[in-house]
Image (cartoon, grey):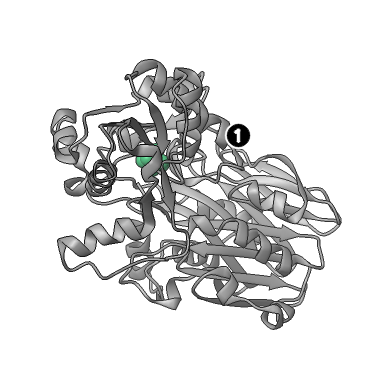
Amino acid sequence: MLEDINEKCAVVGIHGNNEASKLAYFSLHALQHRGQEAAGISSSNGKKLQTIKKRGLVMRVFDEKKLETLRGFSAIGHTRYSTAGDDSILDAQPVFARYDLGEMAIVHNGNLTNAEEVRNKLIANGAIFQTFMDTENLIHLIAKSEQKKLVDRIIDAVQRIEGAFSLVFLSRTKMFAMRDRFGFRPLSLGKLSNGGYIVASETCAFDLVGAEFIRDVEPGELLIFEKDKKPQSIKVFEPTPKHCIFEYVYFARPDSKIFGQSVYQTRKNMGKELAHVKPVEADVVIPVPDGGVPSAIGYSQESGIPYEMGIMRNHYIGRTFIEPTQEMRDLKVKMKLSPMIDIIRGKRVIVIDDSIVRGTTSKRIVKMLKEAGAKEVHMRVSSPPTTDPCYYGVDTPDKSKLIAANMTQDAICKYIEADSLAYLDKSALLRSVNSKEDNYCTACFTGEYIV
Ligand code: SF4
C-alpha cells in the first residue's frame, strides 16, 4: 500500500525525569513512522514552559544544543503527518498557550468529529484562532472553563468534544494524559528505569528509552502526573472500547504492543487466516515490503508454501512529488520497490499486501512481477476491502478514490491484472486480533461509523 493511507500523528509525554526532553526526543524517533512532516517538544522546569517545533524529521528539527534549552523534569512531544500542500508551522504541535492559570502545552493524536461546531461557537463568543487544528479548540475550552483547577478544566473541556483523542497536556508542574471513551488511538503507560513515567502512542518508544510497560491508558481515563507521586487515575467517561483495527493492519510498528497485543504476532495471525480462508496453489509467497512481511510469513507457515523476499524496498528515497507522466509514475514504484528476478522468474507467486487503497500501486507491483518473469501473480490482502474514509485521525483518500468503493472484487482483479485477488474478510480479521467482544472500529471496511 505504501503511502496511500497515513497515520496523522504520534504523541509522547515524560514526567519526573531530569532528562525529560532528551527522552522525549528519542521516543519521537521511535515513533517517526506515524508522522514525518513536523516535530515538536515542550518542556517544563517547574517555572516556565519552553517549546521548539519545526517542519521536518525529528533528527532534523532537534540537535544537542536545542535539546539543552528544553530543560526540566517534564516534556511532551509530537510528530505530525500533514498533506503535501500544507506547510504551515502553526499547525505543528505542541500547541502552547498562556492563560489565567499560567502556561499550558498540548499534543494530540486523533481527530475531533465536532471540531467545526465547537470552533464556530467559540468564534461566535469572541475567540481568535491561529491555526486550522482541532486541537486548538481544547486550549480555548480550557481557558474559558469556569472551573478553578486545571484538572477540572481539562475534564470540562473533554466533555465538550467528540471523536478520537489521545492527548497529553503539560502545565508548569503537572502532566496529564487522556484517551477518548472509545480508545480509538493507542496510548500506553510505562515506568522509566532511571525515574519517572512515560506515556507514548506505541510501546516501541519504551524499548528505545529503557522503560517498562505498565499498561494502556484506559479508554475514557485521565492520568495525572505529579513529581514524586504515582500517577493518579480519574475515570472521566465510561469506557466503550472501539480500537482502530487499522493500527494492527498497517500503522503500528511490528515491535510494538498495542491494545494489549503484539502487532507482529497479530499481523502473522492475519496471514495465517488468509492462507486458511483464501488458499491458492503457488511456488512462493512474497510480501510487499514492509507492511506485508509478517502476514506473508504467517501465510507461508500456514500453507507450507516457501516464503521469500521477492521484492526489495529502497528505504532511502523520501517522497517523490514529480509524477507528470505515466512512465514517471511507474518509475516512482520502481525507485521504491525492485523485484528479485531469480526468485520470481518462472514461478507462481502469491504476493501479500496489507491493504489496497487506490489500486494504482498494486497494479504497478503486479506489472513489475510479471515483467520479472512471474508465471502467475496471486494478490492476497491481509485486510478487507477499504471502502470508506476515516474520520478518527487517519488520513484517507475520499470515497471516490477508494477502488473497493467503486469496483467489484473481480473488476479490481482485472484492473490490477492479477491472476487472482482475495481479501481477508471482517470475521477472519477479528479472529486474527483475538477480538472476543466487538472491541474494534472497522468503519473504513464497513462504513459503520461509531461517532
Ligand atoms: S475508520 Fe478505519 S482507520 Fe479510522 S479508526 Fe476506524 S478502523 Fe481505524
- Local packing at callout 1 (Cα closer than 10 Å; few below 14, some 14-19, many 20+) is some
Q: Is residue 177 above or below residue 16?
A: above
The percent position of residue 362, horizontal first and vertical second, equals 27, 44
Q: Which residue is mark 1?
A: 262
> Residue flagged by tag 1: what amino acid is it?
Ser
The percent position of residue 70, horizontal first and vertical second, equals 71, 77
Q: Which quadrant would residue 292 be assigned to in this image? A: top left
Q: Is residue 402 above or below residue 33?
A: above
The percent position of residue 309, horizontal first and vertical second, equals 46, 40
Instruction: Tell me what residue is drawn at x 36 percent, y 44 percent.
Output: 341
Quarter of the image where ligand 1 sits: top left
* In this picture, residue 126 sits left or right of residue 152: left
- Which secondary structure lies at badge 1? strand
The percent position of residue 328, horizontal first and vertical second, equals 22, 64
Q: Looking at the image, which is closer to me, 132 or 393?
A: 393
Can residue 241 be seen at all in this image of the molecule?
A: no
* In this picture, residue 96 sits left or right of residue 371: right
Q: Looking at the image, which is closer to me, 81 or 354?
A: 354
Q: Which quadrant would residue 221 be assigned to in this image? A: top right
Instruction: Tell me what residue is drawn at x 69 percent, y 71 percent.
Output: 43
Question: Is the CB–ligand 1 distance for label 1 below 8 Å?
Answer: no
Q: Is residue 11 above or below residue 73?
A: above
- Where, quadrant-wise, is the C terminus in this rendering? top left
Instruction: Tell me what residue is drawn at x 35 percent, y 38 percent.
Output: 344
* In this picture, residue 363 sits left or right of residue 334: left
Q: Which quadrant would residue 283 be assigned to in this image? A: top left
Q: Looking at the image, which is closer to me, 263 or 341?
A: 341
